[in-house]
Amino acid sequence: MIDISDCDEWLSLKARASAAPTLRSAFADDPQRAERYSRAAAGLYVDFSKNRIDDAILSRLIALARRAGFEEARASLFAGAKINATEQRAVLHVALRDLAGRGYRTGAEDASGLAAAERRRIEAFCAQVHSGAATGFGGAPLDTVVNIGIGGSDLGPQMATDALKSYWLKGRRALFVSNVDGRHLADALESCDPGRTLFIIASKTFSTEETMTNAKSARAWFLQNGGSPRDIAKHFVALSTNGRAVTEFGIPPACMFRFWDWVGGRYSLWSAVGLSVALQIGYPNFEKLLAGAEAMDVHFREAPLEENLPALLALVGVWNRNFLGVAAHAVLPYDQRLARLPAYLQQLDMESNGKSRRVDGTPVKWATGPVIFGEPGTNGQHAFYQLIHQGTDVISADLVAAARVENELGEHHRILLANFIAQGEALMRGRTEAEARAELAAAGRSPADIGRIAPHMVFSGDRPTTSIVMERLSPETLGALIALYEHKIFCQGVVWGVNSFDQFGVELGKSLAKPILAEIAPPGASAPAASGHDASTRRLIDRINALRRRQTDSPSEGP
Ligand code: F6P
């Protein structure tokens, strides 16, 4: 593999970093800046002009992507090559939304054809549930869905379901249970009528401990509350690649919707894993979600790098991360319905590019994926934006908003949009001490007050942001938005030389939990003193066991 940090493109970007443009002056000097550094595709307008780039930097970034093999990597992705090298798998989530029948394949496997056939089954199943042809054991409609899954088998469908609330079918609800904390399931079941509830067990592997524990407890609850074993087929469906484990669990093959090993868990929303979304918004709207992603796929595949939205976003991110030292990136949707977008993108980005080995197994010598975090605006403004504006670390951010919402409530949406725009402006321009002093003087403050307060009102500005605007949050624009991020993350992985499609980092904690489970005392029982761990781990186990042995439930007693 080439050592990207030794390449001329990288070195010239490095040399350029100390002279990166100052945003305030860059805007003052170039009235065309916003036009120059914004693009539109698939219903999304993306303005990346409030990043510290100029034409020279951008063209070097584009050259860097070419040097890293971006065009070849993109071709390999769409060609169904096994680009997930560690797991020897193709990465073909694009086939799941190949509505136009472009015919993606991997080896002999007709990925698009398989996906289309499974979509027909999902469509038919939705029709049965929605028409009332499929009912619960007492003949009542299945109007409640409980999706049991975690990670990619939860975050995507939950985020999309929340986002598309305007499209919910009347009288239906969807609940999402992911945490192995039993209260998550118990809280959800509290409001469920077993005769009207459809459990969707979503797990690519059908072996994830959290999901299987929740699935077994859900089945036990169902059987204890009026359901019989022969009703399982009416109330439980599985979304998985593992037919054998699904059958062993007791869900018949007819109640299983498949996907394939060329669909990564965090890229699985478009597969059968989207069933809860399709049931909640109706199958035609689910296809529109796929269509929005497909439009972004076409753009990503065909647009030259200079015009390519996912690639440009990726390269701006590389610039911020590797050359300006930005280690954290905030996702700030100015849309309450996108409240779960930051959590979704945390998995998508951090599980994909939180890597320190290159594809060939050698250590990376440069920074890879940043910390991703976020909250909807305006809530975040009253929580952590302080640090983004004035903290000692520079944090980049994506601000996302829809220009229109249905049934605008009074001034709400205008206020929301004004804040969306103002935050980008404030982060870009900052406030000088002279401006702070002038503001205080205009407010009639005394010279002593001005001297005391003005330094605290100084904002450096130059905090990089990208603004993403859509007309409305719809299935199509949501699909395009998610696909934009998927491809952005892919491009960054290519530049950094990592495999964005495995996740070995989540394994160690999982395997260490197994022996510890045997050392945690069951309720009312005791466990032998922990052994074989470091002293801190041992003491934690012993302390927890001691607390669990206590006879009292009084929350007032301290440990
Ligand atoms: O956290 C690791 C992971 O494998 C994710 O990549 C995945 O989305 C999640 O666990 C759930 O996996 P599964 O769908 O197999 O239950």
Image (tube, helix red, strand yellow):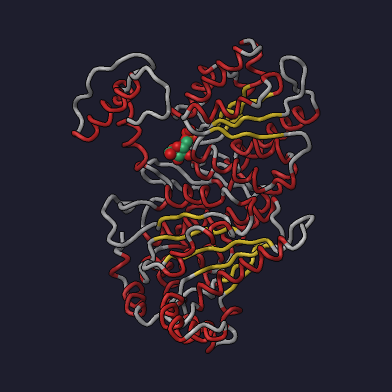
Q: Is residue 101 above or below residue 368?
A: above
Q: Is residue 427 left or right of residue 172?
A: left
Quarter of the figure that contains the C terminus: top left
Q: Is residue 61 above or below residue 156?
A: below
Q: Is residue 283 left or right of residue 433?
A: right
Quarter of the figure that contains the N terminus: bottom left
Residue at 56% from the left image edge and 58% from the top image edge: 484
Residue at 55% from the left image edge and 25% from the top image edge: 186
**How many labels were placed on the picture?**
0
Residue at 49% from the left image edge and 79% from the top image edge: 431
Between 336 and 204, the one nearer to me in the picture = 336
Residue 83 is at least partly visible in this image:
no
**Residue 439 in which image quadrant:** bottom right
Residue 213 is at least partly visible in this image:
yes
Pinpoint residue 451: horizontal percent, then vertical percent: 42, 83
Between 167 and 106, the one nearer to me in the picture = 167
Q: Is residue 212 above or below residue 149?
A: above
**Residue 506 in which image quadrant:** top left
Q: Most extreme residue toward the bottom, as rendered?
A: 29
Between 545 and 10, the one nearer to me in the picture = 545
Residue at 39% from the left image edge and 50% from the top image edge: 499
Pinpoint residue 504: horizontal percent, then vertical percent: 35, 41
Q: Is residue 311 above or below residue 190?
A: below
Pinpoint residue 280: horizontal percent, then vertical percent: 70, 38
Pinpoint residue 284: horizontal percent, then vertical percent: 75, 43
